Image (cartoon, rainbow, N blue to C red):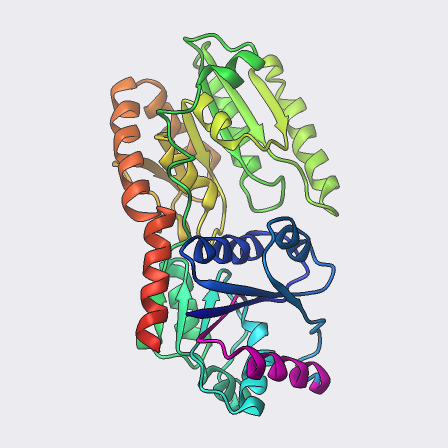
Amino acid sequence: MRVLFTCLSQSWGGMEMYALTTVKQLLKQNIKTELVCFPGSRLYEEAFKENVSTHTFGFKSYFNLKTIRNFSSLIKQNKYDVIECGGSKDLWLVVPALKLAGSNVPVFLSKQMASFIFKKDFLHRWIYSRVTKAFAISSMIAKNLEETTPLTKDKIVLLHNAIDTTKFDPSIIDRNKVRSEFSLVENEILIGMIARISPGKGHEEFLEAAEILSTKFFNIKFMIVGEASRGEEAYAQKIKTQAAQINLGSKLIFAGFRKDTPEILAALDIFIFPSHDEAFGIALAEALSMGKPSVCSNFAGVLDIAVDNLTSFLFEKGNGKDLALKTEQLIVSKETRERFAIEARKRAVEMFDMEIFTNKLINHFKQSR
């Protein structure tokens, strides 16, 4: 089988990381896989570091005839068995190029983000008629695809994003490495969140809950892991100003950007995921894999990952008081934390393991041929 994966985004986030991870997983299974990306993009740079075979196309406008002809030539030359598009805009290059090449190769679309553009006009119907299956990373995204595109329900497949549960494994990660770095003692309960400091991630509610809880418990500390994206520095400063006004002092740690996510999670006793509108939530799946009891917003893609009163407590989105109330239930009950931890790890391994994802993906490819 020969697979071509396209991701023509110039950004670097979940969609682009998914593209590179998927290509690497297919290559691990000895499936010849190549990546199409935007020249000079971060995805191109990261793929180059990983020795992934890449093709670059500077596709910006929807009907760039020269680029379509060049892409059509690539398809004719390499005779791919499957094409997967990492974003819906890629279809505007792939579908016309396939038409020009006279190719009937199956086309898959992976959908990472919701769209609120209604796409059922004549041109979109023509483009989407060429899609064999669309992979939705959560039930929310599946519903969004059905509502906004011409795709029928039978063409939409729920295929959750995946994580490496062998890397995020509490049995092999030292809990005390990060705790020692920040001088945490054994009886201190560390409550943390990992997210880009960006509007909608729920930092305000996290701080509101921290303020409430810090007045009730002496042995708790809070950690915020992450930094602002370019252009969002003012928002990050606003969050730090809010934190200073609360005056938690040494009870609050701003850890900044960290690459040692498994070690950070190992150090936590309770993981908080207060995002307002997450299509899936990789950080939450990683926390489950590390056996972390969690408190999560009751909305969107979170509902595909966390199970209320089994792996997590769900709180009302945007409600810091409710977040504090649900977190308190975990603080006062070690038994509940331990019960959630077992179920969280079990769910992550059964639902979100990378090998399971890869096998499902390959089976869809095989069935389409």
Quarter residue 349 falls in? top left
Q: Is residue 232 magenta?
A: no
**As drawn, is 146 to the left or to the right of 18?**
left
Using the image, determine if residue 134 lies above or below residue 75.
above
Q: Which of 180/184 is in front?
A: 180
| Residue 311 seen in render | no
Residue 335, horizontal then vertical, whole percent: 25, 20
Q: Which of 226/121 is in front?
A: 226
Quarter residue 253 falls in? top right
The quadrant in which the N terminus is found is: bottom left
| Residue 48 seen in render | yes
Q: Is residue 73 magenta?
A: yes
Q: How many marks?
A: 0
Q: Which of 120/31 is in front?
A: 31
Q: Main secondary structure of the magenta part?
A: helix
Q: Which of 135/337 is in front?
A: 135
Q: Residue at x 58, y 73 (%)?
A: 90
**As drawn, is 343 to the left or to the right of 43?**
left
Residue 241, horizontal then vertical, whole percent: 70, 29
Residue 123, horizontal then vertical, whole percent: 55, 89
The quadrant in which the C terminus is found is: bottom left
Using the image, determine if residue 162 lies above or below residue 31.
above
Using the image, determine if residue 364 lies above or below residue 268.
below
Find the magenta span and give its range: 65-86
Residue 336, horizontal then vertical, whole percent: 26, 24
Q: Residue at x 48, y 84 (%)?
A: 120
